[in-house]
């Protein structure tokens, strides 16, 4: 087996670039950088077994110049691959010399007898007296290590340290003589100090497109957010909006494509800079945050948060990666209480592929959440991998054919952010406080009013609304908006809770059994997702098609046979797909 095949076996799936995205820009393929070779054991218990070794770019502190990385029986050392690629990167990208680097160097902690070995220590010069950077390399997907790294920094007095698992990394910075309390977006090159990294101006082209934003958020939680006393979701969103606005400005209005979202040496300067960007974003995209709102993170906390974010490019990034991060940000308990479990993205993709929306069809998600169905529909109909295609998609497709409604504020905010990242800030997303189940609520909010006017303008109402109608009288709500004319509806409606408004229930055929049971003296109630089934079918034009995610009981409980009978009377059932219980 050659080096490429060994790497494929070690990292399982070469299609994901061995999960080594940290090393994508080294100038040549990873299998050309590393030299892995076989040796056959001649004696002992493992006689005859083939082992594979890697020649280290520099000798280990023990004197060894090679290290075992793979054995035929599958035993592998992926962290060693990560370490060697970091050594190559330090020498060839950052300019350090081989005699300024130690591998597996012992770290003494005070009076402890036993020392631990740091994976990589980089020194200021070849005398190796002043540690400058410590790097810890972990197996891909391994989450621990940051606390260990901090202890190494304190023991060795190094101002900079890196935790890396090959696909994600975080760079810690301890401004001397303070204890660790900061981060950097990159490590200093040979001859540079951390302040040089902080003062370096960046352009859009220098920002990383391959990154794991969920991991960045998790790191920030561990470092500062959990102890900040602030709403994590809201504060991270402020930073995201500020960064998207800055990238948009760099792309459209700055000749040198320079970005301003970066930290300074002084936390006060950092705060003023980032907060000003946030306020500009609020002017550009009103209605997402309150008027006059500021970033509430303490300045020292904001200083830490900016470091990992400033080096990545959000606009045009992989939407599924960002979607995964936003799903993580929404508090689990809040999701459970409202029945707003996010739809697994492979389930979303299956639904989109089965319904096969076209570029000229109107697509609606009446409980859109963070917009998984809409985003996948957009990618399905209009793939875009560069800014020109995203602009075309925005003007020709997304702004006209994609529609979404969500009652919950954070979900609507999440989708708005994702649409901005996708390159579209004007998609027909309506909410919060707009209920798909009751058109009368549309008369009460600005977003609901916008929804009604939008539906009339796009001619998506089954009933023609008179031109002189002002849409102020909510008694007309069910007459005008009960039946709509969407081509495709994709939805995972919230299933928690029951609807008890008798006037609203009276408009639903599926609520008739509940109203009959309640009589005149009891509280009538029907489950939310049952009403969504009927509402979705009434939102479809004749010949339209829908995919709805529902609890299994709706299709196998004998007491709910009336729902299935109603569906079969009103629509042609194309498929019932059973999902594994662990999907959610």
Image (tube, rainbow, N blue to C red):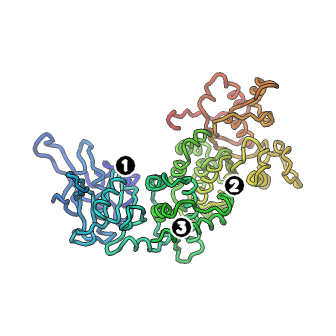
Q: Which residue occupies the extreme left position in the image?
A: 43
- Badge 2 element: strand
Q: Position of residue 8 (x, y in %)?
A: 33, 50
Mark 3, residue position: 271
State left or right for residue 135 relative to residue 582. left
Q: In this view, does 213 lie above or below 502?
A: below
Q: Position of residue 127 (x, y in %)?
A: 21, 71
Q: Which of the pair 315/397 is nearer the observer?
A: 315
N-terminal-most mark, 1 or 3: 1
- Badge 3 element: helix
Q: Which residue occupies the extreme top position in the image?
A: 558
Say which mark, if any, is on residue 428: 2
Structural crowding at the residue carrying mark 2, measured as other residues with C-alpha within 10 Å and reported as few (<14), some (14–19) or many (≥20): many
Q: Which of the pair 35/504 is nearer the observer?
A: 504
Say which mark, if any, is on residue 142: 1
Give the residue drawn at x 77%, y 44%: 439
Label 3 with label 2: CB-CB less than 8 Å? no
Q: How many labels does the image show?
A: 3
Residue 204 can be seen, yes or no = yes
């Amino acid at each position: 087996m050659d080096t490429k095949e060994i790497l494929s076996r070690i990292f399982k799936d070469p299609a994901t670039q061995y999960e080594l995205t940290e090393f994508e820009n080294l100038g040549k393929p990873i299998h050309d950088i590393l030299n892995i070779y076989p040796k056959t054991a001649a004696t002992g218990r493992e006689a005859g077994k083939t082992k594979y070794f890697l020649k280290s770019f520099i000798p280990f502190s023990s004197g060894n110049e090679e290290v075992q990385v793979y054995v035929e029986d599958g035993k592998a050392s992926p962290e060693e691959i990560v370490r060697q690629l970091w050594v190559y990167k330090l020498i060839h990208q950052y300019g350090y010399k081989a005699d300024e680097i130690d591998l597996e160097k012992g770290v003494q902690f005070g009076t402890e007898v036993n020392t631990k070995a740091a994976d990589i220590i980089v020194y200021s010069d070849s005398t190796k007296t002043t540690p400058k950077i410590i790097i810890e390399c972990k197996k891909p997907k391994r989450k621990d290590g940051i606390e260990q790294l901090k202890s190494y920094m304190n023991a060795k007095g190094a101002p900079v340290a890196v935790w890396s698992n090959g696909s994600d990394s975080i760079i810690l910075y301890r401004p001397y003589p303070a204890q660790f309390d900061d981060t950097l977006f990159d490590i200093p090159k040979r001859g540079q100090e951390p302040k040089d990294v902080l003062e370096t101006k960046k352009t859009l082209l220098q920002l990383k497109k391959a990154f794991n934003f969920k991991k960045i958020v998790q790191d920030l939680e561990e470092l500062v957010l959990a102890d900040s006393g602030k709403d994590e979701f809201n504060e991270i969103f402020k930073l995201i909006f500020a960064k998207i606005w800055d990238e948009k400005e760099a792309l459209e209005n700055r000749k040198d494509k320079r970005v301003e979202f970066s930290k300074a040496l002084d936390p006060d300067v950092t705060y003023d800079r980032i907060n000003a960007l946030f306020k500009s974003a609020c002017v550009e995209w009103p209605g997402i945050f309150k008027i006059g709102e500021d970033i509430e993170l303490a300045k020292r906390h904001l200083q830490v948060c900016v470091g990992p974010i400033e080096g990545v490019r959000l606009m045009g990034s992989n939407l599924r990666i960002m979607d995964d991060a936003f799903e993580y940000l929404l508090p689990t308990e809040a999701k459970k209480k409202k029945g707003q479990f996010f739809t697994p993205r492979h389930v979303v993709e299956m639904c989109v592929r089965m319904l096969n929306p076209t570029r000229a069809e109107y697509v609606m998600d009446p409980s859109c959440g963070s917009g998984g169905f809409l985003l996948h529909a957009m990618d399905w109909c209009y793939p875009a991998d560069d800014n020109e295609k995203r602009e075309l998609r925005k003007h020709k497709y997304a702004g006209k054919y994609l529609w979404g409604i969500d009652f919950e504020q954070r979900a609507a905010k999440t989708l708005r952010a994702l649409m901005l990242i996708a390159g579209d800030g004007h998609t027909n997303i309506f909410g919060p406080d707009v209920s798909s189940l009751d058109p009368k609520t549309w008369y009460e909010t600005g977003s609901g009013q916008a929804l009604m006017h939008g539906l009339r303008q796009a001619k998506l109402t089954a009933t023609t609304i008179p031109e002189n109608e002002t849409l102020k009288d909510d008694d007309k709500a069910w007459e005008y908006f009960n039946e709509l004319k969407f081509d495709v509806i994709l939805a995972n409606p919230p299933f928690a809770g029951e609807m008890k408004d008798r006037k609203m229930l009276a408009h639903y055929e599926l609520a008739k059994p509940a109203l009959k049971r309640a009589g005149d003296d009891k509280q009538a109630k029907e489950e939310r997702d049952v009403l969504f089934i009927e509402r979705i079918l009434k939102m479809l034009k004749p010949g339209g098609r829908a995919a709805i995610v529902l609890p299994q009981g709706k299709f196998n409980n004998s007491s709910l046979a009336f729902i299935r009978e109603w569906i079969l009377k009103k629509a042609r059932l194309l498929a019932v797909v059973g999902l594994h219980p662990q999907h959610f």
